Amino acid sequence: MTFELAVCAEMVFTDLDIVERVRRISSLGFAVEIWGFADKDLLALAATGARFSSMTGYLHGDLYDPDGAREVVRTAREAVKAAAVLGVPRLVVHPGELVDGQAARPQYRATGDMWLSALRGLESLGELGAEAGVTFCLENLNTIVDHPGVPLARAKDTLALVEAVGHPNVKMMLDLYHAQIGEGNLVELVRRAGAAVGEIQVADVPGRCEPGTGEIHYPAVAKALRDSGYTGPVGMEAYAAGDSVAALEAFRTAFS
């Protein structure tokens, strides 16, 4: 059983512009992930002929707040248009808006109202996804190192929300780097998440570099994914510890 492997163009080949990064990743046989779409030349990216796996699926808003959730859905419509240009099948959303990687409006306590707001917002995204033929993926984050102040961000929380929505166009973006920092027990986590997962993202801990540079034994994680029947994409959302080509090959080896 093999996975579709993707690489985040925002984090490797950083001496090149984004279009050239996409070309390099694609030439090495990987699909491509990108983050935001508003600052990119979508036609130039499309002209590379690359396969795109996922990208950010909204511009503004917080799912945990009713007004913010409406803003997520409103700006997600812009993401859907961008996704159509590139042929991106999965659009990533977060429980709270990130600005330069940080919580736009930090919240350090989750309430029942926040859960209900996020649930309703994801239901609306599911309807939009069904109309557009895309899947919205709710990404778990760690609030210890990278994204303090984002509520409902742990893997167990994002999984609970996705399962509560129960919509085929709403899945989980299971980021194992974030999960390792915040929760650990990754093999059991991938077994538990099962059919709720739309895509896997990986990086090693500490450092957020390619598999093999830290404490996570990714071959064991890959085996657990295969044993659970997962056949979806696995994306390296990681920096290269050294040479980018070598980093991509280390990633390929870990999941081959």
Image (cartoon, rainbow, N blue to C red):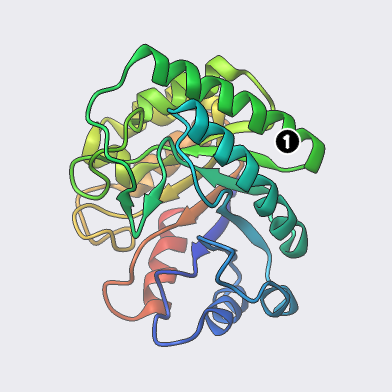
Q: At 53% across and 79% down in the image, what residue appears?
A: 18
- Picture coordinates of residue 16, whole percent (x, y): 46, 87
Q: At 39% across and 78% down in the image, what residue appears?
A: 244
Q: Residue furthest top?
A: 112
The vertical placement of 213 against 114, above or below, is below
The vertical placement of 208 against 245, above or below, is above
In-image side of 130 versus 229 (left or right): right
- How many residues crowd around disc 1 within 10 Å: few (fewer than 14), some, or many (20 or more)? many
Which is nearer the eye, 172 or 29? 172
Q: Quadrant of the N terminus?
A: top right
Quarter-wise, where is residue 26 in the image? bottom right
- Picture coordinates of residue 224, whole percent (x, y): 43, 34
State the residue position of label 1: 128
Which is nearer the eye, 142 or 150? 150
In-image side of 190 versus 120 (left or right): left
- Picture coordinates of residue 113, whole percent (x, y): 41, 15
Numbered marks: total = 1
Quarter-wise, where is residue 213 in the image? bottom left
The vertical placement of 226 against 234, above or below, is above
- Picture coordinates of residue 110, whole percent (x, y): 30, 21
Q: Amino acid at mark 1?
A: Leu
The vertical placement of 106 against 250, above or below, is above
In-image side of 6 versus 127 (left or right): left
Q: Secondary structure at mark 1?
A: helix
Q: Is residue 230 visible?
A: no
Which is nearer the eye, 7 or 215? 7
Q: At 23% across and 35% down in the image, what residue appears?
A: 182
Q: Is residue 232 visible?
A: yes
